[in-house]
Amino acid sequence: MRTLLLLPLLLMPVPPVQDGTVADDGSSVVVIGLKWSKSRQTTEVTETAGTTPAAPIISANKNYERNRRANTPAGVANVPAGVSNPTADTMDVRSAEIERNVQEARSPKRKAVDGFAYRVKVRNASTKVIEVLFWEYRFTETARPANVARRQFLCGVNIKPNKEKELQAFSPSGPGGVISVESLADKSGNLYQEKVVINRVEYADGSIWQRKDWNFAEVRLTLARAVQTPWGLEMCRGL
């Protein structure tokens, strides 16, 4: 359902908002609280297993295989090391092997990814239901304010008027990148000033609010990657 709501964004022209849909100053989303922490997330991955090419079917190979089987002792217990078991060529064994391969292919492969969890609690101060929310967790280096790191996220939500909701997003990227010498020398531990910024709000009635100095076109490619797979239980995805 969320994918259906978000996919039309990719088809909209740039700029994607029309006259009368953007508020002059400030959004109707009030940030109540924010925090981040180290986290580990288990994700499904698609693995492409390497396969060994089958030997070409030529006369030499056929004769070799025929002679090998003829010299193979009967019975499972007497099969010498390095020689295939003749019972492995029976229909039942082959069927069981095929079924096992099918089941393994259907089973999702999972891996643990270390990263960071970003949380923000918001309140909808408008009279309309919010369906889609673009926001960012911003880190500004205290000793060098020009050094700003932004972690942007997209959320499919359903926040009714005057209701609060906690949003959580996962990202492999941490608070910041390069730290100045001044910040490393600061013993107070306040390396960053943290802030959550609301970039875009889409309402159930089709209206849109967007921050004036935020460019939707800059996230178009990352947005396409974020919505190209069906959404599961997650509420937000990184951009």
Image (cartoon, helix red, strand yellow):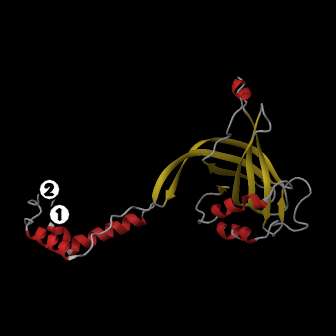
Q: Are marks 2 and 1 in contact (CB under 8 Å)?
A: no
Q: Quadrant of residue 96?
A: bottom left
Look at 81% across and 59% down and name the residue there: 161
Residue type, label 2: Ala
Question: Dot 1 corresponds to which residue?
Answer: 84
Residue 160 in view, yes or no: no
Is 47 displayed left or right of 17 in the figure? left
Q: Which numbered disc covers residue 66?
A: none
Disc 1 on helix, strand or loop?
loop
Label 1 environment density (alpha carbons within 10 Å; few <14, some 14–19, many ≥20): some
Q: Quadrant of residue 68?
A: bottom left
For the N terminus, the image quarter is bottom right
For the C terminus, the image quarter is bottom right
Q: Which numbered disc covers residue 81?
A: 2
The one of 82 and 139 positioned closer to us in this rendering: 82
Mark 2 vs mark 1, CA separation in Å: 8 Å
Residue 225 in view, yes or no: yes
Please state the horizontal and vertical placement of residue 165, each as a whole percent of the image.
72, 53
Residue type, label 1: Ser
Look at 66% across and 66% down and name the residue there: 2
Is 144 displayed left or right of 21 in the figure? left
Is 163 situated above or below 150?
Answer: below
Please state the horizontal and vertical placement of residue 225, each as a whole percent of the image.
63, 62
Please state the horizontal and vertical placement of residue 192, each as a whole percent of the image.
74, 35
Please state the horizontal and vertical placement of residue 43, each as a whole percent of the image.
52, 55
Is 200 situated above or below 56?
Answer: above
The one of 103 and 78 positioned closer to us in this rendering: 78
Q: Quadrant of residue 128?
A: bottom right
Look at 73% across and 72% down and name the residue there: 11
